[in-house]
Image (cartoon, rainbow, N blue to C red):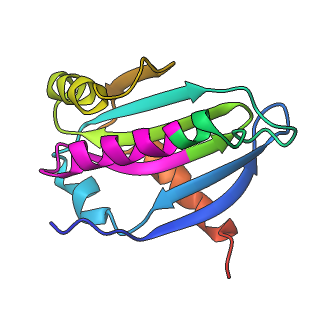
Amino acid sequence: MKLSDNWFTALSENDAQQLIYITGRTDLEAFRTSRKFPYRAEICWPYQPDSKGMPQKGNESDLMVQTEDLLRAAMEKDKLGILTGIYTGGGEKYWVFYLRNIKVFGERLNDALSPLPPLPLQIECEEDRDWEEYTDMQEMEIWAIRD
């Protein structure tokens, strides 16, 4: 299975009617149907938003980018986990990964982020063999922002 690097960006709103940017990965059908990635991890970084609900420019925003890069490289190098979606807005940034193994994911997450200072991450993992969250997110592609 070849991992694509094709993404779309769409806009939505949370329950408080704050703008949420959704960045979703496409072309993952082979991974979804393989059933080799039965677990979903959602990593949330709560932040103090700017007036539009987005991360404020500066150290924290830069650290979010660095965190995403480290996590993606660590999880995707041997396809332990696949980053499928990123949600940003309303004072929270979420990364969604589908995983082969939760225990190894936790160990690798800690190793990957060890060079960074302690981060305010909240992590939830659960079984999602049918990739329900991914399927819901893919429905947002019809609202994708086009150039």
Residue at (58, 59) in percent of width and height: 139
Residue at (53, 49) in percent of width and height: 136
Q: Quadrant of the C terminus?
A: bottom right
Nearer-the-camera pick, 132 or 43? 43
- Name which quarter of the figure residue 75 lies in: top left
Nearer-the-camera pick, 119 or 91? 119
Nearer-the-camera pick, 73 or 145? 73
Q: Is residue 35 above or below residue 38?
A: below
Q: Is residue 26 above or below residue 68?
A: below
Q: Quadrant of the N terminus?
A: bottom left
Q: Residue 100: give x, y in percent of width and height.
A: 17, 38
- Name which quarter of the figure residue 37 lies in: top left
Q: Residue 134: give x, y in percent of width and height.
A: 44, 49
The number of numbered discs placed on residues in the rendered structure image is: 0
Q: Does residue 92 appear left or right of residue 7 in this picture? A: right
Q: Residue 88: give x, y in percent of width and height.
A: 63, 43
Residue at (37, 48) in percent of width and height: 69
Nearer-the-camera pick, 134 or 17? 17
- Judge whether residue 49 can be spotted in this image: yes
Question: Which residues make up the magenta segment?
Answer: 63-86
Q: Is residue 81 magenta?
A: yes
- Judge whether residue 132 can be spotted in this image: no
Residue at (19, 30) in percent of width and height: 108
Q: Is residue 28 above or below residue 15?
A: below
- Name which quarter of the figure residue 107 lies in: top left
